[in-house]
Image (cartoon, rainbow, N blue to C red):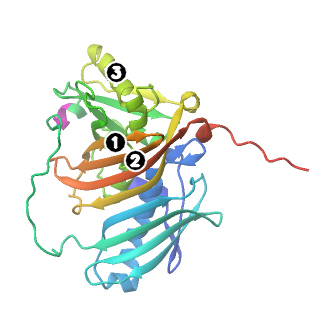
Amino acid sequence: MASTLKKQIGLQQIAPDTYTAGWHVDWTLGSTLFGGSVAAMIHHAAVTHLTTDPTLVKQNQPDILSLHIEFLRPCNRCESTITVTPLKIGATLCTIQLKLLQKNQIKVIALVNSTNFDKPLGPTAPTAWNFQPPPKPIPDFQKVLTKQPEEHWLPAHLSGEIIPVTKHLIILNPRGGFPVDGICDGWYGFRKDEGHADDEMDATYLAMMTDIIPSMSDTLLHNEGLYDAHAFYQKMKAWAKDHPGIPVEVVNSVAQALEASIYNNTVTLDLEFKRRLPDGLRWIFTRVATKMLREGRMDLDITMCDDKMELICAARQLIAVLEAQRKFRPETPKAAL
């Protein structure tokens, strides 16, 4: 799927500091593209520039250490142009700025700090950090893929008209649901029945996955919205009683989205990669945690681990929780004289 995603992006260099990128229906959220796909476009363009630009290649920093994205305006279903400007060239870290434009309008601005994870910059020391509360034990992935009941996790497939890229994934939610307000755990892997079980996740794919998560606003409000984790889990639980080990098929639609009362508008997204991703990564664990939802302003921390529960990425979103109809209502034709 990582290679599929890059094919969908279709990055093309049209000048030394300029690229074009396409779009795919898999990424659509109504008339716009969801933020994770935009993050993947930016990440792919940044890595490509870091590893092909003659000046940056000399620094030998092929990895992205941090990525900060400002979503100024929604990205639509059309080609994007991405420009890259080096801000600092250094032997330890380089900083580049990227701008994503559509029809000559700036939609996104991003800052990237590069590194080389093969080269230590300084000391290493352990910390006492761990997940609190602790998540359920690591799933038996072989049982999941062969559709046998897993002791601690329930499986699901999510497909439909809203962000259809999720149809390629198996989603695992913990048995018992989400008892702690503001915390949602999940595992995400590729579906075996679609021929993707042997595919791998890379850092660009991980950038997209920071936005394939439950809606914490829907979940905290228990409003049974499209991405309310409690409502999603109840469907999994009910299905599992008579179909142990078989993923429940959850389908969404634009019509359902139109009935929603709120939607999440990502204002900023920050990613910090902790290491180069291991080869053969096919499953990731994600914990999503919110400290506060107040008057439509919400923080979101996303902690991502590999299939051995080793920390690989820490991300954060600043979200404005807005009226849903603003996102999904049809565009009103402009008056003509």
| SS assignment at label 1 | loop
Categorize mark 2 by other alpha carbons within 10 Å: few (<14), some (14-19), many (20+): some
Q: CA distance from mark 3 to mark 1?
A: 28 Å
Circle 3 or circle 1, nearest the eye: 3
Residue shown at 10% from the left, 72% from the top: 123
Q: Nearer the viewer, residue 34 or 316?
A: 316
Categorize mark 3 by other alpha carbons within 10 Å: few (<14), some (14-19), many (20+): few
What residue is shown with label 1?
195
Residue shown at 15% from the left, 74% from the top: 120
Q: Which residues are magenta?
A: 139-143
Image coordinates for residue 329, horizontal then vertical, percent: 65, 37
Q: Are marks 1 and 2 in contact (CB under 8 Å)?
A: no
Q: CA distance from mark 3 to mark 2?
A: 22 Å
The outermost residue toward the front is 295
| SS assignment at label 2 | loop
Circle 1 or circle 2, nearest the eye: 2
Q: In the rendered structure, does residue 124 fall within the stretch colored magenta?
A: no
Task: Establish if 93 lies above or below 331.
Answer: below
What residue is shown with label 2?
211
